[in-house]
Image (cartoon, helix red, strand yellow):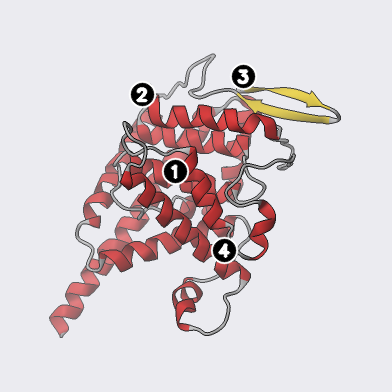
Amino acid sequence: MRKTGHYEILGNTKYFIPDRLPPQNPPLDLDHQTMALFGEAMHHLGKLNEMANRLPDKKRFIKAYVIKEALLSSAIEGVHTTMLDVFTQPLLDVQPSKNTQLVMNYTQALDIAVTMIKKKEIPGQDNPVSSHVILAAHKTLLQGGEGGKADPGHYRKQTVKVGNLVPPAPNYIPELMSHLEQFINYDKSLPPLIKAGLAHVQFEMIHPFLDGNGRIGRLLIVLMIISNELLREPILYPSYYFKKHHLEYYQSLDAIRTQGNFENWITFYLKAIKESSIDAFTRAKDIETLEKTLTKII
């Protein structure tokens, strides 16, 4: 069993402090089957990336994909609305429902974060996924309404509990997030797609915010994939698979803390990337075919 962190007792509370990435003692061990799955995931990501260049209405299409990920990621957290509600809201004279507003916020958060990454705001770094980007995304995600209670754009300053896990005490968060940022941007020991899966796990164990951790953690996967130029645009929605297999998703995440089983999580995560890429590619292909059919009819 791999040790992935340690517990500290403060008062009556037992906090879990995750170790730094990448996994050690022993190092991450990806067998032939997992590496074959990695190759398949990379292949389908590449096909999706190539398809992005052929989209008939790129701006509108990307917006639809971003909204789809927003809907799915939010639904995992019990926030439910429809794509129709999100698309038609700008045409209405009424305030959006709480859930629709949260999904709209998610699309804006992803857009802001991707823009910041592509601008390469930090000199000397290529496409950094920094704490600055994560905080900006969180601020946008929870802006307005009741989200203000979660102190948008700031790390939490109080203890939280997630199931049986009590994440690190607030005073640990800045250092842990700094370590995660260093792993994301400087570690060269693992392929970028694998790193994105590990970074998601670490983020969830740190649980740096009062609210929105799941959505920002899943958004982090997309940001790292774009940052490493595996995709040019945010047209991947991994939450498609996470929601479909939500029980296995949470069990795989928890098994890292309780059993040190990073390998099982990586297998599950790579399946999510592969299946989400196939679904996104298929929808893009269908739209391309439909456009050609309609053009021929006209």
Secondary-structure class at tag 2 = loop
Q: Nearer the viewer, mark 4 or mark 1?
A: 4
Q: Position of residue 100 (x, y in %)?
A: 56, 69
- The answer to whether the residues at label 3 and label 2 have Cβ atoms under 8 Å apart is no
Query: Does residue 245 appear anywhere in the picture?
Result: no
Alpha carbon of mark 3 to alpha carbon of mark 4: how far? 37 Å
Q: Position of residue 36 (x, y in %)?
A: 34, 32
Checking the image for residue 292, the label placed there is none
Instruction: Residue type at mark 2: give it.
Output: Lys
Quarter of image, res 146: bottom right
Q: Residue at x 44, y 63 (%)?
A: 67
Secondary-structure class at tag 4 = helix
Q: Which residue is mark 2?
A: 188
Q: Is residue 30 above or below residue 74?
A: above
In terms of depth relative to the viewer, which is nearer, 137 or 187?
A: 137
Alpha carbon of mark 1 to alpha carbon of mark 3: how far? 24 Å
Q: Which residue is mark 3?
A: 3
In terms of depth relative to the viewer, which is nearer, 277 or 11?
A: 11
Q: Is residue 288 left or right of residue 146?
A: left
Query: Crowding near pointer 4: few (<14 within 10 Å), some, many (20+)?
Result: many
Q: Say whether disc 1 or disc 3 marks the residue closer to the N-terminus.
A: 3
Instruction: Residue type at mark 4: give it.
Output: Leu
Query: Does residue 31 appear anywhere in the picture?
Result: yes
Q: Residue at x 48, y 33 (%)?
A: 198
Q: Is residue 94 above or below residue 217?
A: below
Alpha carbon of mark 3 to alpha carbon of mark 2: how far? 22 Å
Q: Nearer the viewer, mark 1 or mark 3?
A: 1
Q: Which residue is mark 4?
A: 102
Alpha carbon of mark 2 to alpha carbon of mark 1: how far? 17 Å
Instruction: Residue type at mark 3: give it.
Output: Lys
Q: Which residue is mark 1?
A: 221
